[in-house]
Every structure is written in structure tokens, then in C-alpha cells.
Amino acid sequence: MRNFFQSMNTNPAYQEDLPEELIDGEFVAMSPRPTFNHNRVSENIDFIFRTYLKGKTCIPFGDGDLFLTEKDHFLPDFMVVCDRDKIQGDGVHGAPDLVVEVLSPSTAKRDRSYKMDIYARCGVKEYWIVSPESQSVETYRNIGAQFRLHEVYSVYPDWMLAKMKPEERAEVTTVFQCSLYDDLDISLDDIFSGLLPNNQKS
């Protein structure tokens, strides 16, 4: 069987193999490599959950292989697994409780369509789509093997907040909770801290 991480590109000029996902039976290289802001957001989310879950049953994975079906082997940006029997030496076999995908231009369509559908049908309880570009978090909850949008949380720039009426600013949510843990307050500032500004991304 083909190595999960073997690059499809055989160009000898490539110094490093690009990781791949098996999507509907086809190997798809995760190219180009994630940006600084993509990695930063992933690391921030991992830190939030790793700190909270220390000493608890559930296990956070900031980087790991996920085997859901014979045709679908994914590499989520982050996941939480509470059934430790699903964890094997080569990765996680079966649906995690939480999956987070951080959007990249090359992966956004799959994250919002095919992969989202597979996550739901396989039993992932909660799914996040996180955008470093817009600094937003979309949270979806599983309802009968389908995801239903629960809420969208966004960081509003200062100029936009300044234009809001006081009652509008009062309704802006900056801290939210995952459905798995009602005692974990998740701050948008913590998720999107340390990002490069737009004019420095390249």
C-alpha cells in the first residue's frame, strides 16, 4: 500500500515530501504548505485544549492521521478524541469528538463540502471551520449524521466596533464554548493571537 505521506510529486527538486490526504479514494497532496498564520491558529487552538485537557480522559491532537473509511484518510488541523480505543500507533481510527479545519485557499472547498460530509456521516460531534483571514470560527453540531451551523464567531476590527451602537457592541461575542465542555471558555483573542497583519503575510 502506498505510504500515506509519500509525495505525489516526483520532481527531484522537491527537498521535502508534501503530506497527502486520501479523499474519496484519491491521494491529494496538501500543497502549498500552510502559511504562518494558518500554523499559528492551529497551534493556538491546540494550546487551549491541551491545557484544559491535561489529566483528563480526552486526548487533543494538533497533528495526526485520521482514518475514517477505506477511501478517506484525513489530516485535520486539530481534533479531540475521547474514546482512547480509537487511538493506534499510526493515528486515530474512527470519528473524533471534535474536528477543527483551518482554512487555506487550496483546501477550503473540500473542508466545506466533501470532508465536512464525511465527518458528519462518520459521527464527529462538533466541527469547526476557522478562517485566519477573516478571524472567524464557524461551529457546527451533528444532528442525525448531518452538521447544522450552530454559530459564527468573529473578531471585529476597531473601526467596525466604533461604528456600532452600544447595544450592538454589547451583543458581540468574544468568548464561546465547545459543546463538549461547558466549563471551558474559549476566547477569540486567544485563537487569533500573534497573527501577522495582512501586509506581512507574504
Image (cartoon, rainbow, N blue to C red):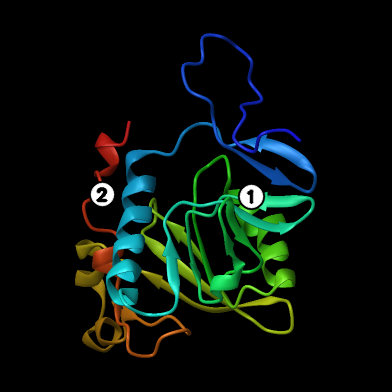
Would you call the spot at circle 1 few (<14 residues within 10 Å), some (14-19), or many (20 or more)?
Answer: few
Question: Residue lying furthest top in this view?
Answer: 12
Q: Position of residue 145 (x, y in %)?
A: 73, 78
* Secondary element at image label 2: loop
Point 46% across, 16% down: residue:
15
Residue at 69 percent across and 71 percent down: it is: 120
**Quarter of the figure with the N terminus:** top right
Q: Earlier in the sequence, mark 1 or mark 2?
A: 1
Q: Quadrant of residue 118?
A: bottom right
The kind of secondary structure element at disc 1 is helix
Residue 8 vs residue 185, the one in the foreground: 8
Whether residue 156 is visible here, answered yes or no, is no
Q: What kind of residue is marked 1?
A: Lys
Q: Is residue 71 visible?
A: yes
What is the CA distance from the residue labelled 1 to the residue labelled 2?
A: 23 Å
| Picture coordinates of residue 48, whole percent (x, y) | 30, 68
Q: Quadrant of residue 167?
A: bottom left
Which amino acid type is shown beneath numbered disc 2?
Leu
- Identify the residue under disc 1: 109
Residue 25 pos. (x, y %): 80, 44
Which numbered marker is on residue 195? Answer: 2
CB within 8 Å, label 1 to label 2: no
Residue 143 x/y as whole percent: 68, 84
Total labels drawn:
2
